[in-house]
Amino acid sequence: QRHLISAADLTRDDAVLILDTAEEMARVADRPIKKLPTLRGRTVVNLFFEDSTRTRISFEAAEKRLSADVINFTAKGSSVSKGESLKDTAQTLEAMGVDAVVIRHGASGAPYRLATSGWIDAAVINAGDGTHQHPTQALLDAFTMRRRLIGRDAGLGEDLSGKRITLVGDVLHSRVARSNVDLLHTLGAHVTLVAPPTLVPVGVESWPCEVSYDLDAVLPKSDAVMMLRVQRERMNAAFFPTEREYSRRYGLDGDRMARMPEHAIVMHPGPMVRGMEITAEVADSPRCTVVEQVANGVSIRMAVLYLLLGGNEPAVSHARANAS
Ligand code: CP
């Protein structure tokens, strides 16, 4: 059984294949009938133990566009709130005969446990686990960068070699940052993290990136600047600068955006905290790709599902089933 647990598990060729397949999937969205028969008769469960707007809706849209049967499970309102374990939940799903499980969980490592436990015989796709990984987010971010910085058709077969990507904010709690650092490094990009000293993880020296505390110095050398959400729900208030102090040093406003090269883009995985991480002027500017990232997420998730579950009918001419 093949799974997608971590962006670090993807080779350069795996990642480029997913990006190229997602370009083919995006063409389906341009058709009058936005559906492929690829996963007809296959069942996918969306197993969400943590809140989500973008990831949950986008996986569901991707599954339906591939004609899969979709079961949505949220911990709230399920027997998890009565104390049922992940093992018992997995075995309940196994009894129903599912082919893939898309899982979001607050505990880092829960998708890996599900994939390796033998509790369920299904492909496992990590939709975000604790502060660990969010691989489809990193893939949709790389897809957005490749389209904007290289071009939709020119980008086919290409990686992000030589591109300079800056990630700003709460790196400590961010699975999006960890996944992006891993994938962007694999794709040849040069990554710089900018964060308050209290929000830089211990051991960051071993990550394949640089760390800076001076956003204004890094902005003119960036092709893309990704603002990260400040995750107050995972944070001890004692370690957090005041909102005013945070936005003064690490927030992106119009004046700061003007320091970026003309071609450079602003990204955010969402949900955004407007005013603190990013001003409305920047979030709503044409240089900001937030809405594009959401749309691209459907194409990426279609590509991952297609490559992992290997439909009976070829959806795209060159697709091979070796995503992970
Ligand atoms: N980017 C992201 O994971 O958003 P959601 O939490 O809304 O899924």
Image (spheres, grey):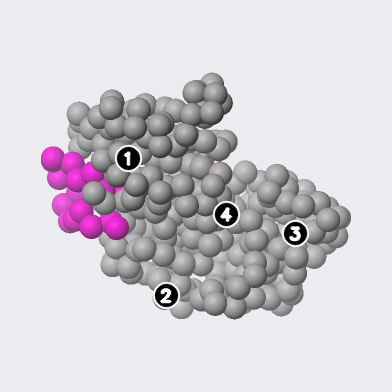
In this picture, which residue range is highlighted in magenta? 304-324
Distance from disc 4 to disc 3, alpha carbons, whole Å, reads: 22 Å
Q: Which residue is mark 4?
A: 131
Instruction: Identify the residue at horizontal 51%, vertical 76% (top origin).
Output: 208
**Contact (CB < 8 A) between labels 4 and 2?**
no
Among the two numbered marks 2 and 1 on one chain, the one whose residue lies closer to the N terminus: 1
Q: Regarding mark 4 in the picture, which secondary structure is present there?
A: loop
Which mark is in front, 4 or 3?
Answer: 4
Instruction: Identify the residue at horizontal 39%, vertical 40% (top origin).
Output: 102
Q: Which residue is mark 2?
A: 188
Quadrant containing the C terminus in the rendered view: bottom left
The reply to whether the magenta stretch includes residue 320 is yes
- Dot 2 surroundings within 10 Å: few (below 14), some, or many (20 or more)? some
Among the two numbered marks 4 and 2 on one chain, the one whose residue lies closer to the N terminus: 4
Distance from disc 3 to disc 1, alpha carbons, whole Å, reads: 44 Å
Q: Which residue is mark 1?
A: 119
Among the two numbered marks 4 and 3 on one chain, the one whose residue lies closer to the N terminus: 4
| Label 3 CB less than 8 angstroms from ligand 1 | no
Distance from disc 3 to disc 2, alpha carbons, whole Å, reads: 27 Å
